[in-house]
Amino acid sequence: MGNRVGIIGVGQTHHAAKRLDASGTELISEAVSRALDDAEITLDQIDAIVVGNMDHFENVNYVDMWATDGLGACMKPVFKVTTGGTTGTTLGACGYYHTGSGIFDTVLAVGWEKNSESDTQAAIATCANPVLERDPFAGAIGPLATEYSMYMSVYGATQEDAAIVAVRDRNNALNNPYAHNQMKVTVEDVMNSPMLSFPIKLLDICPRSDGACAVIFAAEEKAKALCPRPAWVHASVVRHDYTHFGDLEWQWMPTLERASEAAYKLAGITDPLNEFDVAELYIPASTCGVKWMDSLWFCERGGAPELIRKGTLEMDGQLPVNPSGGVIATNPIGATGLIRVGEAAWQVMGKAGDHQVLDVNKALVTGFGGCSWSDVMILGADLP
Amino acid sequence: MGLYTDHRKVTHTPDGYELLTHESGHLEYDFGWHQGPYWSKYLVEMRDNARFMGIKCPKCERVFNPPRAVCGKCFVEMNEWVELSDEGELQGFTIVRFPYIDPNTGELMKVPYTAIWVTLDGSDVRMMHFSNETDEKDIEVGMRVRAVWADEPRPTSIHACQYFETIK
């Protein structure tokens, strides 16, 4: 199974609609410096670097070369990944694989994006088969909106259920100084916002952001030597599915069901709602924050609306979800998944400041992308 | 955490230079995507014979639409073609109202338009296409729908079928 691995430091930029004050490279170096600061180590203690973003957004396809200075990558091994929405959590998995392998002791994972530099929806549309699926695809929102139309029909979920999720994540962001969107909203505000793609409305959906995040992974002995309270990796699982959107099962998410099931088994979790103390979940639209809870084994299929209406996943509920504000508050796409990893790590390390959940021992992290890929990572305060 | 200076509203450098954004101007990138034997046959059948062809896996017996060489679950090559009905069940939909640029043309998509997932009779999977209904009151999951084909000469694309209409 490889070495045990801990996260020993996290850095984030202040995320915004536009960061005019920093080029892509500069945004990267900001996150990297902050992560090194957080871990109280220097660059010469980093053995390897993994970096990721989505090439289309900035039209630079050699970020590992073009941003070498900002990454601190001179004369170091660098590995680039680009996996759409899951880029950030793939970076987490990569950081873990590299240190877990025993080949590198300390690995810096960096996710970033300058979404403001280009047309986000047009770039995202290129993930769909150009001849067979791109035309009806309707950008990132299309499949998410369509799957919820099915979920509402089969299980009686409502737009109001989704609005509760939007309110939760947006209001949680008020306690996160790095969040892009910080706005106090009510269910009524969400329901009255313009309809973008039935049933998803403006306040239901994530923004696009400029931002970067860096997370430092260390193999067990190194982590113990460098960090008083690492966030230990208990599980890291990735699952993919069919290629065509129409092939997938959309009433539930098979990849998330299977990935979380496998991760829970690795981490010895049998009752996720009770055993996790906090969750940073990849929820790009409020509708996902309803429907996808089924696929995390929090409840039976179709049981999510009940959880949402009872407040189970609020900050004062049984399992606080997205204390950082989640994706709905902040979305620099190449960084977004890694921000989930970093925020969950801070929760375990007791470094989440104003949005810290008390007594965090175990944290759940998810990533989602394109054609329903799912990444799941579990972090804990104790060695696994 | 939270000890760093927030530069988000900055518009000039510390010594007074305006922070610039360099516009690329209009970029065009042309591509010619090879369709391979399966998608080529699929598209030609739509264009010339106004019909949808699926393909069946010899192992799990699932019929896929659009067809492709390999069954994802079984990793087995498929060669048994199946003619599908052009009627089926509407399984999911969204009515798109926000305008965005069509990456195929560089122009704004005309909205509202309705994207659907439809399972044609004979197929085990859903296909992405369009409905001509753009009012939430007139469309629901579970409806039966039927393909409306373009007039000849039909294009060599999924638009050989214009959209799906509700069977009332």
Image (tube, coloured by chain):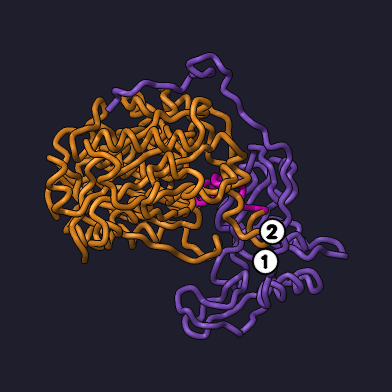
Chain colours: A orange, B purple
The residue marked by circle 2 belongs to what chain? Answer: B
Q: Which is more toward the observer, A190 or A51?
A: A51
Q: Position of residue A12 (x, y in %)?
A: 35, 34
Q: Most prominent secondary structure in the magenta stretch?
A: helix
**Numbered circle sitting on residue B87:** 1
B101 lies left or right of A92: right
Residue shown at 19%/40% (left/top)? A348
Mark drawn on residue B167: 2
Magenta-drawn segment: A135-149
Q: Amino acid at mark 1?
A: Glu
Q: Label for residue A345?
A: none
Q: Secondary structure at mark 2?
A: loop
The residue marked by circle 1 belongs to what chain? B
Q: Closer to the camera, A306 or A133?
A: A133
Q: What's under tag 2, amino acid-wise?
A: Ile
First reached walking from the N terminus: tag 2 or tag 1: 1
**Residue at screen point 47% across, 81% down:** B60
Q: Is residue A384 above or below residue A336?
A: below
